[in-house]
Image: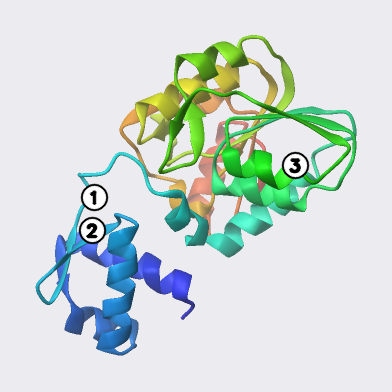
Amino acid sequence: MLVAERYEMIIQLVNEKGSMRVSELSELCKVTEETIRRDLDRLEQARQLRRSHGGAVSVKDEQPETPYAVREIMNAEEKRRIAEEAVKQIQPHDRILLDASTTAWYMASSLPDIPLTILTNSIRVATELAGKEKIEVISTGGQLLQRSLSFVGPLAERSLETYYVDKLFFSSQGVHLERGISESNELQARLKQKMVSIAGRVILLADASKFGQQAFTHVVKLSQVSDIITDSRLSDPLRSQLAELSIPVTVV
């Protein structure tokens, strides 16, 4: 089991049960108790759980947004494949909008240095693109959310109002067939609503773990999405339901 997979498993177990002991996690993850203690220390630093005597306690309902460092290691391989597929849909001279998701950052890192205009609210995306001379990068500015390294708020929303883009590539906390796309943070949700409104094509980048989930704040209806790129773990019933909604889905 990879380290990232173990972190994901620990978080899931602690959230499902409310609390777990080090000995239980050691047995389930098939690693030593010392390794689990180190994992719990790191996950506590990332505010994914809270250490307790002999184990860990869930903080699922205490935090509004998953830290970037944790999102970066969760489902990393799937996100890279999704990002590489998304890059194939970009043509020279496109005007692109990238959100502050880790999948968007993977896109930025794999983009060729071709003439593009890229608008983003992500510090990580802007920094990644800074070394590519042919790509013009525009940052929204605004209120900085330290956990996601992204700009949000009224200034960022007003900045978006001055632009129109050919394609938006974005992700979300939850994708629900009936209830639509959702975010854990209201400021992120409002900004993504604005992003959708200024884009010609709206391309959702969502690994299979996002489907069936409903976060706190509604973003947009699924019908407002032009295309979905996801990974091969997406179940056959979900693929059939998406086909019935006439939403093109690319599975990688």
Tell which of 95 and 237 is nearer to you: 95
Q: Given the image, on which type of amino acid does mark 1 rest?
A: Lys
Q: Evaluate if marks 1 and 2 touch, with contact meaning CB atoms under 8 Å apart.
A: yes
- In the displayed structure, 9 sits above or below 130; it is below
- Residue at which label 3 appears: 130
Name the residue at the left extreme: 53
Q: Which label was assigned to residue 60?
A: 1
Tell which of 61 and 67 is nearer to you: 67
Secondary structure at badge 2 equals helix
- Label 2 to label 3, Cα distance in Å? 38 Å
- Label 3 to label 1, Cα distance in Å? 35 Å
Residue at 39% of width from left, 65% of height from top? Answer: 8
Residue 251 image offset from top left, x and y in percent = 65, 52
- Residue at which label 2 appears: 15
Rendered-image quadrant of the C terminus: bottom right
Q: Given the image, on which type of amino acid does mark 2 rest?
A: Asn
Would residue 143 appear left or right of 62 to someone viewing this image?
A: right
- Label 1 to label 2, Cα distance in Å? 6 Å
Which of the 4 quarters of the picture holds residue 125?
Answer: top right
